Image (cartoon, grey):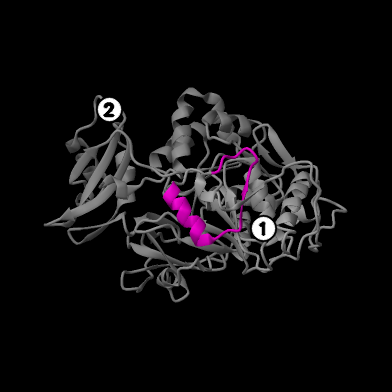
Amino acid sequence: MGSLFPALDSAAPGSGRRETGLAPAEDPGKVALRFGERALTYRELAEAAGALAGRITAAGPGTGLRPDADPGRVALWAAPTLETAVGAVAALLAGVPVVPLNPRTGERELAHIVADSAPFAVLAGPDDELPAALEALERVDIPVSGVTATPLPPEAGPDSPALIVYTSGTTGPPKGAVLPRRAIATTLDALQDAWQWSADDVLVHGLPLFHVHGLILGILGPLRRGGQVRHLGRFTPEGVRRELTGGGTMLFGVPTMYHRLAEALDDDPELAKALAGARLLVSGSAALPLPDHERIAAATGRRVVERYGMTETLMNTSVRVDGEARPGTVGVPLRGVSLRLVEEDGTEITALDGETIGEIQVRGENVFTEYLNRPDATAAAFDGDWFRTGDMAVRDADGHVRIVGRKATDLIKSGGYKIGAGEIENVLLDHPGVREAAVTGEPDPDLGERVVAWIVAADPQAPPSAGDLTAHVASQLAPHKRPREVRFLDVLPRNDMGKIMKRALHG
């Protein structure tokens, strides 16, 4: 696997850093990270992260943070700041697993994460205000300047834990997915292959840094390539326009962000020009509705690339930049990823007909090691060495994957049919009177489950009728897929990543 960050390992000549046998950074003075007006070059990042890594790894009572020789874990207050990026890199250089903490997490959930992961310290920016749930932890302020790098231990092994990322709990408290170093390297190198990601790329995004998308792909990805990341701090279409116009080549976002970009395009020709000039536009974390695909393509001539991954597996599939851009699919399995669809009884689906729905299972070096302290949940998550994703999909004739939704919330069994909610949602979103849409199933004494559409109207004062929406779906899909009920809302409930929280719709 080699080093996670070859550009950093030699960016500070004479600092006593370990040798990797890999080529040195071409330009240690090149900007690695930029958050607004604040930036660090590769040399400055190596010095800042190296100094913090030295503090983390220092052993012995009273001489360092660790109580003994065990690497332990550190928590990271993952605000969208330069300090968060430095803290994550430092922990990885030190070989100490890091637990990113969402600053918006509620007190009860945060207390659970801290008790479950048992970090010996919390890394935070000097100006961060930490909640009471973290008071018992030793606080370590993250330096970004005025430091000198110290020698580091040898690179940790590929199966050593790198991050412990807590998943959103649906029926209980969040579980900590233990991600090994090999999973990070494997995923980022597979995306290099699929996206032709290079050191010349400048990535723009405004994603939160407590999860896979923003932290691993959005921060560690550019650093592994020796490129640059420009974090917006807070996502705005104006920020995207500014950074892409100023040299950005790639944009990462979630569907909510691309929806806002699509809406802004009508009144902002400079935004359209900026998006058109980007080499790669990538959407993830949830399906990008087809209407937003089409609006962006019509205004810019560029197609948004979708990929599919999750906390436990990092990235599984993607549309390739050297392949066909096909809205509605998440592409083909990445290099090194094995993927199959299975029936409810575990039988593998071999049909590539674009119609037969099955659960996605994957295996490969990208898959997590375990759920921390949960051997029962870990065992239940696997079918042999295949990880059960809980996502339902179909595969087209050429192997492209189209996700229809989550097994628990998006697979509707109605009248003997298996119906994917995503297909109906895309048709509803194509109606001019619909701004947002979600589709769920509810118990029905006759059908087993009935299809229910939840709608945010484009004009709340003059919403489309339920009959109009039902007829709209029936005219484009099979009759059994039409909504049996239509319910109007002012807003759909979403989490921090922009995903619709469908369980909340049923109260």
CA separation, marks 1 and 2? 49 Å
Residue under pointer 1: 92
On the rendered structure, is 169 left or right of 309? left
Residue at x-position 28% and y-position 47%:
439
Residue at x-position 45% and y-position 68%:
374
In this picture, is 358 found above or below 229?
below
Residue at x-position 56% and y-position 52%:
136
Q: Which residues are magenta?
A: 107-130
Q: 275 or 484: which is nearer to us?
A: 484
- Residue 192 seen in the current view: yes
- Residue 298 seen in the current view: no
Q: Position of residue 170 (x, y in %)?
A: 36, 56
Q: Position of residue 62 (x, y in %)?
A: 73, 59
On the rendered structure, is 169 left or right of 155? left
What quarter of the picture does the N terminus occupy?
bottom right
Residue under pointer 2: 460
Q: Please name which of the two marks, 1 or 2, marks the residue nearer to the observer.
A: 1
What amino acid does circle 1 point to?
A: Leu
Q: Position of residue 460 (x, y in %)?
A: 27, 27
User: Disc 1 or 2, which lies upstream in sequence?
Assistant: 1
Check residue 480 for magenta coloring: no
In this picture, is 126 found above or below 170?
above
The secondary element bearing badge 2 is classed as: loop
On the rendered structure, is 248 left or right of 266? right
Q: In the displayed image of the protein, which residue is found farthest to the left? A: 446
**Are there few (<14), some (14-19), or many (20+) residues within 10 Å of tag 1?**
many
**Are there few (<14), some (14-19), or many (20+) residues within 10 Å of tag 2?**
some
The secondary element bearing badge 1 is classed as: helix
Snapshot quadrant of residue 344: bottom left
